[in-house]
Image (cartoon, rainbow, N blue to C red):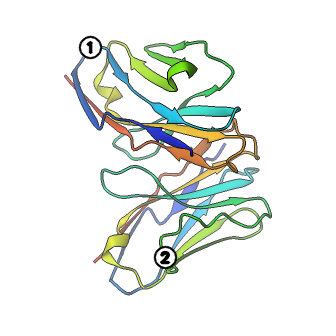
Amino acid sequence: GAGVSQSPSNKVTEKGKDVELRCDPISGHTALYWYRQSLGQGLEFLIYFQGNSAPDKSGLPSDRFSAERTGGSVSTLTIQRTQQEDSAVYLCASRLGQGVFNEQFFGPGTRLTVL
Amino acid sequence: AQKVTQAQTEISVVEKEDVTLDCVYETRDTTYYLFWYKQPPSGELVFLIRRNSFDEQNEISGRYSWNFQKSTSSFNFTITASQVVDSAVYFCALSGRDTGNQFYFGTGTSLTVIP
């Protein structure tokens, strides 16, 4: 079956522009996560969606970052007024249900470069 | 607090050597799961293994083995007879029942296998 997909795979933008990153989770997965990975670094949690519950936004680094998930499926991460320090790979992961034992399945990521 | 520590930032081994990647965790949950992921140079994280907090049996899968010890809060990963294809960044992660489905990732260990 199809895995997690993300688009675009690469995005180059100018400082100050807004960008939207898209994530298509695995069908039937109710949990969706966004992470940021800077070059050579670990995974930085950004936001988590679970079903129809209010998202956990505790990892968003500033109010320039926002995300939504429509219809419990596709998610969009929006970064407004991009800064050079936003350059990173943005990873999306989905997970089946709320069970603590369920692993996350990751997409290939979107590499964002802010000039 | 929930925390995963991978003290080894980078490891280099010569092909066919054995290598152990360390993972130490902290949690107040009594029920939790530990995971290992592999991130090859292509970038996509791949799930390797899951272990629950009540199962301390070691696991072997081909050249991979995992040693879970609750007494030392460790979940170490050993690759036997390493191969160049094992070169990747390896992440250890923790998911606890009482932590709202959050995943806690370590900072990763970059393994280079030299031919």
User: Is residue B47 visible in the rendered structure shown here?
Assistant: no
Of the pair A102 and B46, the residue shown nearer to us = A102
Identify the residue at image location x=66%, y=34%: B32
Of the pair A80 and B101, the residue shown nearer to us = B101
Label 2 sits on a secondary structure element that is loop
Q: Specify the quadrant of the image occupied by residue A55.
A: bottom right
Numbered circle sitting on residue A37: none
Q: Is residue B114 above or below residue A45?
A: above
Q: From the top left corner, tell me how far across and down residue A9 is, in percent.
A: 44, 62
Pinpoint the chain carrying mark 1.
Answer: B
Identify the residue at image location x=65%, y=26%: B53
Pinpoint the chain carrying mark 2.
Answer: A
Identify the residue at image location x=63%, y=50%: B102
Residue type for callout 2: Ser
Q: Is residue B60 left or right of residue B38?
A: right
Q: Is residue B26 left or right of residue B53?
A: left
Q: From the top left corner, tell me how far across and down residue A103 is, in percent.
A: 63, 39
Same-chain check, marks 2 and 1 = no
Identify the residue at image location x=31%, y=14%: B18
Q: From the top left corner, tell me how far across and down residue A18 is, in percent.
A: 46, 83
Mark 2 neighbour density, 10 Å: few (under 14) some (14–19) many (20 or more): few
Q: Is residue B57 left or right of residue A111?
A: right
Whole-number angstrom distance, CA of label 2 to CA of label 1: 45 Å
Q: Nearer the viewer, mark 2 or mark 1?
A: 2
Residue type for callout 1: Glu
Numbered circle sitting on residue A62: 2
Question: What residue sits right under mark 1 in the picture?
Answer: B17
Label 1 sits on a secondary structure element that is loop
Q: Is residue B25 left or right of residue A103?
A: left
Q: Is residue B109 above or below residue A74?
A: above
Of the pair B75 and A77, the residue shown nearer to us = B75
Q: Specify the quadrant of the image occupied by residue B21.
A: top left
